[in-house]
Image: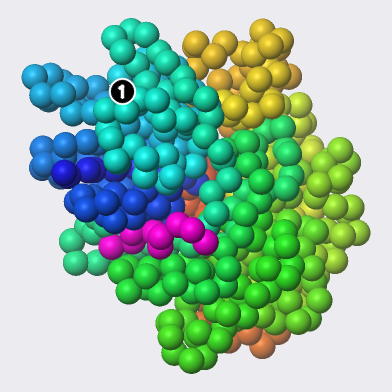
Amino acid sequence: MNILIVEPTNDWPSVYSYAKIPRLGPLRIAAEIRDAGHKVIVYSEAISGPLENHWELVNEANVIGISAISAFAPDSYDLVQKIRQNYHREQKPIIGGGVHFTFAPDEALGKGFDIIFRGPASIIFRKFLKNMQDLSIDGISYRIGDQHFHNPDAPKKEDLNDLPAPAYETLHKPGNKWPIGFSGTLEGIRSCPHNCKFCTVWKMFGPVTMARPEIVIRDLRAMQDALSPKTIIMADDNFTQKREKSLAIAEAINRAIKDQKIMPFGGLIQSSIKMSLDSVYLKALKVAFPNIAVGLENFRSDSYKKRGSLEEVEEFFSTLGAWGFHVHAMLIIEPDMAWEEVKRTVRELRRLGAKSAQFTVLMPLPGSDLYNELVEKGDLDPKNQNWRNYNAFNPAPCYPAEMGDKMNYGWVGFNSPRLVFEKIGDMLKAGVNFERSAYHFVQSLAVWYPGMRWAWQNRGLPGVLKALKWSLMG
């Protein structure tokens, strides 16, 4: 049997559209399919381009799986309709999975999906492959005609040590080489201890589970053998949440590099302000993971409980800066943030010494406590969602367009070429080598460009001129 798993994308200017990164979920499931004796291909549109350019893969598939986050849900539904139109006489089962469909199964079934796998799907798929006619499996939703059925949830916690290595070799490759910006993904610690009201990670994956160091090395070798990526991103939402466990993983990677069992790479991990900052820990992380992305959310006092006090934030940036880490800050623009607060956030990031930053608007994602709260209040209609746009909930302190401008101010204001050149000058004066400084310039420019493209696509020439002003004036 031939099974095709697709990760849709679009060309809208967002951090997700630009990322040339395969998601681990489909590769995990592909390993189960491969080990069951079936042929499987994982097709990422972000990496290989529109699936329409390789429609022969759809022709050859007996079963089609689609995995998506909320940003690409509409593209998934469009793809389902195209498949239905082309194969109206031949029923190809279409299965949906991933975080969006997990929390919006009725929406997905109503858009043409046959079956939805809710939550981590490796073990669910393992059971499904034994008998595809069995619809009694826990963790699935399905439709018969216009009726939707939802089985009880499956256990969310999957032991990473019991799963096979992701089937990296099944990832479709566009031509003879991977696109610019391509990165591999690795998993060592799944889920997150923080129950943030806007996030669904902890609801999707349940309790935190960790892979043993030897399992991480196994997966890393499999990835390098199949993909040979220059950059590797730990998909863990908070890699540093458990110091001893993550230290053991980092030290195992360093030993494997030293013993030439794996190739050196430039890695990135996600962290929180609360991570340990002792020299033993940072020395181990620095070898494989010189880039750290930290979720700050914002500088409001009510976010300190999770994020840490301003003193802790300052210690975090100053310590990692002294060690030479590239710290990438991730922030959220909330509906009631005034322009001055947004500008102050950008100024504060510069003062702290963040090397790059990304800004997103507060999005009520399905399944999150925020989403459920707004639905209960009647401020958000779950049946009238347009996931291509930001759906402002009512009453809202500002228009969605204004939130978009505030978000883009952060992108182009902080990551402006003028400031990047200033930072590079400081780096060269401090004795940082030219190669590292040039890498920082390219990395920062790559973060600045999406903001300029967003301005063009959403505001036209006036928007571009305004964005250039923000970039030049800071």
Residue at 31 percent across and 23 percent down: it is: 114
- In depth, the one of 23 and 1 nearer the eye is 1
- Can you say whether 331 is above or below 89 in the image? below
Using the rendered image of the protein, determine whether residue 230 is visible from the camera's viewpoint.
no
Q: Residue 3 at what x, y percent from top left? A: 22, 43
Q: Is 140 left, or right, of 438 in this rendering?
A: left
Residue 83 belongs to the span the image colors magenta: no
Residue 62, image quadrant: top left
Q: Is 246 left, or right, of 259 in this rendering?
A: right
Q: Residue 264 at what x, y percent from top left? A: 47, 82
**Residue type, mark 1 in image:** Asp
In the rendered image, which residue does mark 1 sit on?
114
Residue at 56 percent across and 38 percent down: it is: 155
For the N terminus, which image quadrant? top left
Q: Residue 199 at what x, y percent from top left? A: 65, 37
- Can you say whether 133 is above or below 44 in the image? above
Q: Residues within 10 Å of mark 1 (few under 14, many from 20)?
A: some
- In depth, the one of 153 and 371 nearer the eye is 153
Q: Residue 368 at what x, y percent from top left? A: 64, 29
Residues in magenta?
Answer: 161-169
Residue at 47 percent across and 23 percent down: it is: 151
Residue 146, image quadrant: top left
Using the rendered image of the protein, determine whether residue 304 is visible from the camera's viewpoint.
yes
Residue 300, image quadrant: top right
- Can you say whether 23 is above or below 303 in the image? below
Q: Residue furthest bottom?
A: 259
Residue at 78 percent across and 81 percent down: it is: 279
Residue 163 belongs to the span the image colors magenta: yes
